[in-house]
Amino acid sequence: MTMSEPRIPYPQDDADPAALNIERMFGHIADDLRPGFSALAGAVMRTTSLDPLLREIAILRVGHLSNCAYEQFQHQTFARYLGMEDDKIAAIKTTPDNPIFDAKERAIMRFVDEIVRDVRPSDAALADMRAHFGIEGTFTTLIAACQYMTVSRILETTGVPIEASDSIGLGRLKNSQATAQ
């Protein structure tokens, strides 16, 4: 296996050279599961109930805690596109108490930490999320984190390699934003 070969091969009928490696691998998802899985992933990326930069903090934290380099690579690109500074992106790999984060960002990072590590967040982390985001924003963050936990585990199990350039993923993000408008 080389860095360009996944641990599980891409589907034999994979014929789209412009597709992201993750999209190619998702060709293995059963036909009856694919529409729902894709709909959830798309909804998480298009939701208006959570600020996109806060969503990216949650996703990047999941990617970091899951040791998923692919997820981190793609979503660092998205976060930069949305205006997040490189020092904040790097700090996501540190502690929620890092002074670079504001109270909302710390709440999301603590909540995600506890979901990933402990499954059930503490009462304090849940209360902090509810205080900052209400029930809907808390649920949106929970769904986003859990969806990206699933994606990270699929990526790590299958060994999907990172693309040589971030332009494909960035193009997908721009297209999804244009479609949502």
Image (tube, rainbow, N blue to C red):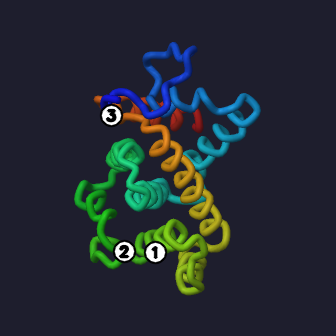
Q: Position of residue 14 (x, y in %)?
A: 53, 17
- Vertical comparison of 156 with 18: above or below: below
Can you say which quadrant of the picture contains the N terminus?
top left
Residue at 66% across / 41% down in the picture? 37
* Residue 53 seen in the current view: no
Q: Is residue 13 above or below residue 111?
A: above
79 relative to 158 in the view: left or right: left
Q: Residue farthest to the left? A: 87
Amino acid at circle 1: Arg
> Residue 155: x and y, percent?
47, 42
- The residue singled out by tag 1 in the image is 110
Label 3 sits on a secondary structure element that is loop
Q: CA distance from mark 2 to mark 1?
A: 6 Å
- Is residue 56 found left or right of 80 in the rendered image? right
Q: Which residue is mark 2?
A: 96
- State how far apart marks 3 and 1 are (Cα): 28 Å
> Depth check: 177 or 23 in front?
23
Q: Position of residue 75 (x, y in %)?
A: 40, 47
Residue appearing at x 51%, y 49% in the figure: 153
Which element is circle 2 on? Answer: loop
From this view, report whether residue 135 is shown above or below residue 174.
below
Q: Which residue is mark 3?
A: 166
Point out the tag, 3 or 1, that comes first from the N-terminus. 1
Q: Earlier in the sequence, mark 3 or mark 2?
A: 2
